[in-house]
Amino acid sequence: MALTKKQQQLIFDLAGDNPVARAICSCLQGRERNWSNHSAEKLLSFAHMHTPDGEPPTYQGVLEVLKKFDEFELGSFKVGRKGKKTRIEWAEGISLKEIGLAGRSITEELDDEYEAAGIPKPSSSTNSTPTTLKGLVQHQYKLRPGLELPIYVPEDLSPVEARRLAAFVGSLSME
């Protein structure tokens, strides 16, 4: 089931007004597979990864977005009870990637915000030489064929920080 024009416009408007919704849309536009539901906690961790600056996203902010998605008939907002987590159960046939792309014009503006902050846009270059930026070292990590990610870490990354970062990345899996 494709999104209606009205749903696309509602998502676009929400992403324009709400940085948490913008971050969630940014995450969803990269989804290759659909899931039947997402917990609020999981979406909060995704929102943290997709918020370049400003106020960090809050759990309450994620709940507000999920309630809006329910109003837009994208899924059903469920409050956690009897051991289940607070979540959104996506409507049957809804494409998560399409939800993310509905806010795409807004999230594309983030590239300009990265440049304004002095952080270069990710490049498709295969140059493996790390570049230094304000005490950070950029590494290119080839996650899978055709997908190379820039990762910025402190020049003096400690083993404890490396383990914390590895645990955080491990928590991002949607499986």
Image (cartoon, rainbow, N blue to C red):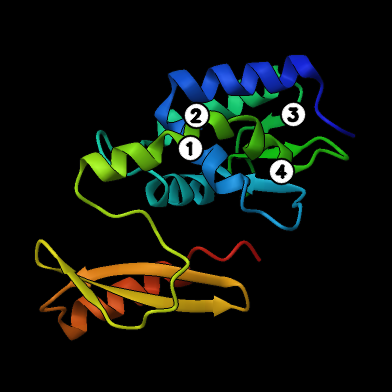
Which residue lies at the image location 66% right of the left edge and 54% below the top edge? 31
Residue at the spot of label 3? 74
Amino acid, disc 2: Ile
Q: CA distance from mark 4 to mark 1?
A: 18 Å
Amino acid, disc 1: Glu
Amino acid, disc 3: Leu
Task: Judge whether 163 appears above or below 107 on screen.
Answer: below
Assess disc 2: are there few (<14), some (14-19) or many (≥20) residues with their C-alpha within 10 Å of its C-alpha.
some
Residue at the spot of label 4? 96
Residue 162 drawn at (x, y percent): 26, 79
Assess disc 1: are there few (<14), some (14-19) or many (≥20) residues with their C-alpha within 10 Å of its C-alpha.
few
Mark seen at residue 106:
2
Which residue lies at the image location 66% right of the left edge and 66% below the top edge? 175
Disc 3 versus disc 2: nearer the observer: 2
Mark seen at residue 108:
1
Which residue lies at the image location 46% right of the left edge and 39% below the top edge? 23
Query: Nearer the N terminus, badge 4 or badge 1?
Result: 4
Q: Nearer the viewer, residue 41 or 132?
A: 132
* Element type at mark 2: helix
Disc 2 versus disc 4: nearer the observer: 2
Residue 172 drawn at (x, y percent): 50, 63
Residue 141 drawn at (x, y percent): 43, 78
In the rendered structure, are the residues bearing label 3 and label 4 in contact, judged by CB atoms less than 8 Å apart? no
In the rendered structure, are the residues bearing label 1 and label 2 in contact, judged by CB atoms less than 8 Å apart? yes
In this picture, residue 123 sits left or right of residue 96: left
Query: Nearer the N terminus, badge 3 or badge 4?
Result: 3
Q: CA distance from mark 2 to mark 4?
A: 17 Å
Query: Nearer the N terminus, badge 3 or badge 2?
Result: 3
Query: Nearer the N terminus, badge 2 or badge 4?
Result: 4
* Element type at mark 3: loop
Residue 18 drawn at (x, y percent): 44, 23
